Image: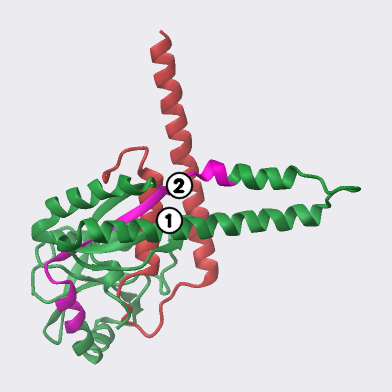
Chain colours: A green, B red
Amino acid sequence: MATYLYCIRNDPHAVPAALTGIDGLPVRGLYASGLTAWVSDVEDSPVRPTVERARAHDAVCAAALAAGETPLPVRFGQTFTDDAAAAGAIAARLPALRERLGRVAGCVELRVVVTRGREPSDRANALAGEDAATPAGGTRGRGTAFLRRLAQQGRAELAREVECEELRHAVRAAAAGYIVEQQRCEAARGVSYFPVLVRKSELGTSRAVIAASLPSQGIEAALLGPFPPYSFAGDV
Amino acid sequence: MSGESIDNAPLELADLINRVLDKGAVIAGSVTISVADIDLIQLDLTIVLTAIETARRNEQRRRALEAAE
């Protein structure tokens, strides 16, 4: 049995009754050097990630956010041999944890996810045209086709990154007064996105202003959240 | 745009995985996710996304049938 860590809070707010985490095990508060960590037991260590376990981790962090003060969400998969080891690790990083908690205090994370880039069909058609062209006096081999496909994928990814950055700058310009912090675009598991930190007290207006700025760049995007500020928690 | 609408479900799931696995404070000296584990969750994700896509297609088919009746 090991101790699994979900998030860290400044206040000693009680964990909601019957809140469960990974594998349905109960979540409890662990007092550590003036901070409160939300933890549960786990049977297996290391904890292998599954979609259900990722959902459970996120649900606990979301419950902590809903309970009042913004928590510092912890990355999936951090286990300790027992509660004392978890408390020790927190104590060892206390100044950095307090600084991070102060940075995200009163804030939530929104995420702009690009769902469709600008004129993808035009790009694809142009490249398909190049593929279709046969060189004089011969045919292209499989190797050439393979390299062309790689180049096409690379160009598409680069274009998506550039478009995502353009969108990020447009959002920044339109909603500057509502954005506490913003991070660069990233791409992972087929999704391009950028996170934005906004004040919880201005959530409705922030969402509306950011959502209104999205169509201006001709790129389709979805605005997701609010979430605990995972992207602004950083390494400690 | 948020919410559990069937159209946004794959996007939200992919985003959740990105958030929880790649972001958040790292307190422990060792984060216990190996490359093999990431592959596993990618596989899980593919299965779930495929299931959602199938459900979405079935829903579209059902609506088309209802409209035709």
Q: Amino acid at mark 2?
A: Arg
Residues in magenta, as a range: A98-123
Q: Which quadrant of the structure image shows residue A97?
A: bottom left
Asked whether residue A166 appears in the rendered view, the answer is: yes
- Give the chain letter at badge 1: A
Q: Position of residue A87 (x, y in %)?
A: 22, 85
Which one is in front, A136 or B62?
Answer: A136
Q: Is residue A73 above or below residue B10?
A: below
Q: Which residue is mark 1?
A: A163
Which one is in front, A179 or A41?
Answer: A179
Q: CA distance from mark 1 to mark 2?
A: 7 Å
Name the N-terminal-most of marks 1 and 2. Answer: 2
Q: Are marks 1 and 2 in contact (CB under 8 Å)?
A: yes
Extreme residue in the top direction: B69
The reply to whether label 1 and label 2 mark residues of one chain is: yes
Q: Which residue is mark 2?
A: A118
Q: Position of residue A152 (x, y in %)?
A: 63, 54
The quarter in which the N terminus of chain A is drawn is bottom left
Q: Amino acid at mark 1?
A: Glu
Queried whether the magenta region covers residue A108, the answer comes back as yes
Q: Identify the residue at horizontal 25%, vertical 91% (top origin).
A: A92
Queried whether the magenta region covers residue A100, the answer comes back as yes
> Within 10 Å of the Cα at label 1, are there few (<14), some (14-19), or many (20+) other Cα atoms?
many
Q: Identify the residue at horizontal 30%, vertical 62% (top origin).
A: A195
- Give the chain letter at badge 2: A
Q: Is residue A5 left or right of residue B62?
A: left
Q: Is residue A171 above or below residue A116?
A: below
Q: Is residue B9 above or below residue A11?
A: above
Indicate the secondary structure of the residue bearing disc 2.
loop
The quarter in which the C terminus of chain A is drawn is bottom left
